Image (cartoon, rainbow, N blue to C red):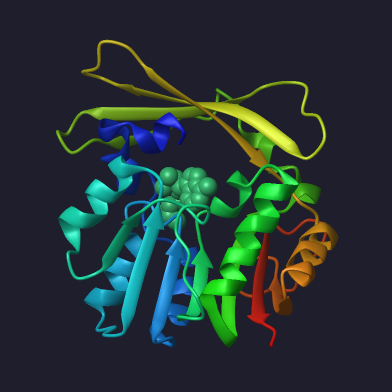
Amino acid sequence: MVDRSFGDLSLAALYDILNPWGPGDDFYLGFVMGADAVLDVGCGTGQLLRRAHGEGHRGRLVGLDPAAAMLVQARQRAGAVEWVLGDLRTRYWYGEFDLVVMTGHVFQVLLRDEELRAALRAVRGALRVGGRFVFETRNPAARPWEAWTPERVREVAAPDGHALRMWHEVQRPVLGDRVTFTETYDGDTWQRPRVSRSTLRFLTPEALDAHLREAGLTVVDRYGDWRRTPLTATSPEIITVAEAAP
Ligand SMILES: C[S@@+](CC[C@H](N)C(=O)[O-])C[C@H]1O[C@@H](n2cnc3c(N)ncnc32)[C@H](O)[C@@H]1O
């Protein structure tokens, strides 16, 4: 089951307002525009593929997501893209794509080793030899969850003009490589706040590389931020470009 943030129609309708286009999207757009056939796993509201289509990409664009509410947003805005409901366990593709992306830290929803292995096998299977898998995961060494506190409230204007607030709270203690937290949404005109609960996994670069290797994916580039700075212990992101081995 998907988290309430993505499964609830009214919260999915607010996703793009709370997550506007940013430097990470520019980074991915460059890869998408340079590839003929692209699979976006966990495409959400489809911002990336919608923009690619709008900027003249005329190859195959496929967005996959298990949250129907997110795909409602995607479909309303770009009918020309192929939007598929499901995930890498329910839909398979064989050697059809030049590029597979997982953006917006979707990779971190893969919590169990078996789930991760199966997803990476499916990514490798979907790619042509030499095709690329590009994704990012937050760097556990930078302990980003320490900043996910209820005092840090994000406030944006909802489509009706009223204020909408969102904040995080991490479940303590944080044990192992998983972080469980809530996202609370509250609007000026809402009767009560809406709370979504999530768990994300934070893998080290070494653990990531071992999983990628096992799936037949070779790391060709690694960055620590969207400016393509090399990864260090304090980098916010682990951004990986991997290639499908023969
Ligand atoms: C934070 S959003 C990111 C959406 C989009 N990639 C972006 O960057 O805006 C995470 C998305 O991952 C989807 N998701 C959850 N579990 C998933 C899974 N097992 N496989 C693929 N996508 C999943 C959610 O439904 C949600 O749309």
Residue 104 drawn above or below residue 154: below
Front residue of 167 and 6: 6
Question: For residue 186, which quarter of the picture?
Answer: top left
Q: Farthest top residue? A: 191
Q: Residue at x 75, y 73 (%)?
A: 230
Q: Residue at x 25, y 19 (%)?
A: 188
Front residue of 230 and 217: 217
Q: Is residue 7 visible?
A: yes
Question: For residue 195, which quarter of the picture?
Answer: top left
Residue 225 drawn above or below residue 89: below
Q: Residue at x 69, y 88 (%)?
A: 246
* 30 sits to left or right of 193: right
Question: For residue 143, which quarter of the picture?
Answer: top right
Q: Residue at x 76, y 61 (%)?
A: 208
Q: Is residue 146 visible?
A: no
Residue 27 pos. (x, y %): 50, 73
Numbered-mark total: 0
Residue 162 drawn above or below residue 71: above
Residue 121 pos. (x, y %): 64, 65
* 3 sits to left or right of 151: left
Front residue of 171 and 188: 171
Residue 35 pos. (x, y %): 43, 86
Residue 19 pos. (x, y %): 39, 49
